[in-house]
Image (tube, grey):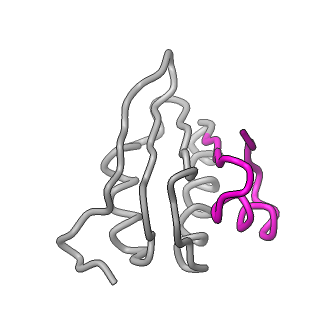
Amino acid sequence: MASPEQDFPASSGVEGERLIFAPVGELDDEVVLREQMQAVIGDFGRAVTIDLSDVTFLPSLSVGVLVDVLREARAAGSEVELVADQGTIAHRILLITGLPHTSR
């Protein structure tokens, strides 16, 4: 498990009007995941894409963080899109949980 001081590897940037956040590897510490996403996304001032294609482990508590982010974005009047490549661990979990997402 990642320590609270350790971030997950991730990239972030902007494509057009969208903010892109792409974590990599095992998202096994939901507290760190939530903190990183809050630092990158901020107050949902723009549409956000969370690309989970390079995630290799996505436990239920981290899925809960994604649900919270979707809910918070909706409440703020913003859009968050979850994206995962077909066949990846994240894609399978998004399918099983029924979370709205885009497959590539």
Number of numbered tags placed on the structure image: 0
**Image quadrant containing the N terminus:** bottom left
Q: Which residue in the rendered view is the most extreme toward the bottom?
A: 1
Check the image and report above or below for 37 versus 95. Answer: above
Query: Residue 53: x and y, percent?
Result: 57, 50
Query: Residue 57: x and y, percent?
Result: 53, 72
Q: Residue 70 vs residue 40: left or right? A: right
Q: Which residue in the rendered view is the most extreme toward the top?
A: 16
Question: Residue at horizontal 41%, vertical 25%?
Answer: 14
Question: Residue at horizontal 64%, vertical 41%?
Answer: 81
**Residue 102 on the magenta segment:** yes
Check the image and report above or below for 47 versus 54. Answer: above
Q: Residue 9 vs residue 48: left or right? A: left
Question: Residue at horizontal 62%, vertical 53%?
Answer: 70
Quadrant assignment, res 11: top left
Quadrant assignment, res 49: top right
Query: Residue 56: x and y, percent?
Result: 52, 66
Q: Which residue in the rendered view is the most extreme toward the front?
A: 87
Query: Residue 64: x and y, percent?
Result: 59, 72
Q: Which residue in the rendered view is the most extreme toward the left?
A: 5
Q: Which residues are magenta?
A: 80-104
**Image quadrant containing the C terminus:** top right
Q: Residue 39 vs residue 97: left or right? A: left
Question: Residue at horizontal 37%, vertical 30%?
Answer: 13
Q: Residue 31 vs residue 98: left or right? A: left
Q: Looking at the image, which is closer to me, 87 or 44?
A: 87
Check the image and report above or below for 103 versus 89. Answer: above
Check the image and report above or below for 60 versus 41. Answer: below
